[in-house]
Amino acid sequence: MTVKQQLYQHCAEYVQQRLNTIENTIQSHQKALSSETKSSAGDKHETGRAMLQLEMEKAGQQLASVQQMKEILAKIDPTKPSSIVSLGAIVNTSLGTYFLSISAGQLQVDKDVFFAISASSPIGKLLLGKKEGDALVWNGRKIEIHYIS
């Protein structure tokens, strides 16, 4: 398995873990909502239901975000090499090595460290379309692109 395929696999696992966590949270809140019974402390009951409803909405937004990550990963072919920075590219720079995919943070393959970043992140936007040997300035720092794969 290539490094790019391993990075892709790490990102897919990251998305699946987030999805499982959110689904468990939603199920837990649904159980709590259905088991809430009207007590003599009506206001307290209504406040509890309102808080659960807010948590459900938050979980729904997180679920939409994870679904979007899945869609982005579906657009990546980890077997395809890249010569310019685009979605699915590994970009080695003077600042670090990036995998342009989803924001999954720091990933490690063997002893090498990579940063999985979104193409819509500030640095991702700057890197898009660049070629080997190009340079850019980010946060006042010059970044040189060493290679792209």
Image: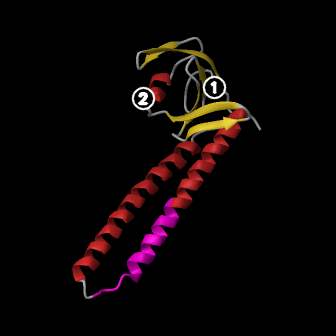
Image spot of residue 139 (x, y percent): 41, 20
Task: Count every numbered label the image shows and give the total.
Answer: 2
Q: Residue at x 45, y 15 (%)?
A: 141
Image coordinates for residue 2, horizontal then vertical, percent: 74, 34
Disc 2 marks a residue whose amino acid type is Pro
Image quarter of residue 52: bottom left
Q: Is residue 24 above or below residue 130?
A: below
* Front residue (pair 35, 57): 35
Look at the image and name its color scheme: secondary structure
Is residue 24 placed above or below 127 in the rendered structure? below
Q: Is residue 88 magenta?
A: no
Q: How busy is the neighbourhood of tag 1: few (under 14 within 10 Å), some, or many (20 plus)?
A: some
Q: Position of residue 127 (x, y in %)?
A: 50, 23
For disc 1, the marked residue is 82
Q: Callout 1, which amino acid?
A: Ser
Q: In this image, 98 relative to 123: left or right? A: right
For residue 149, what is the image quadrant?
top right
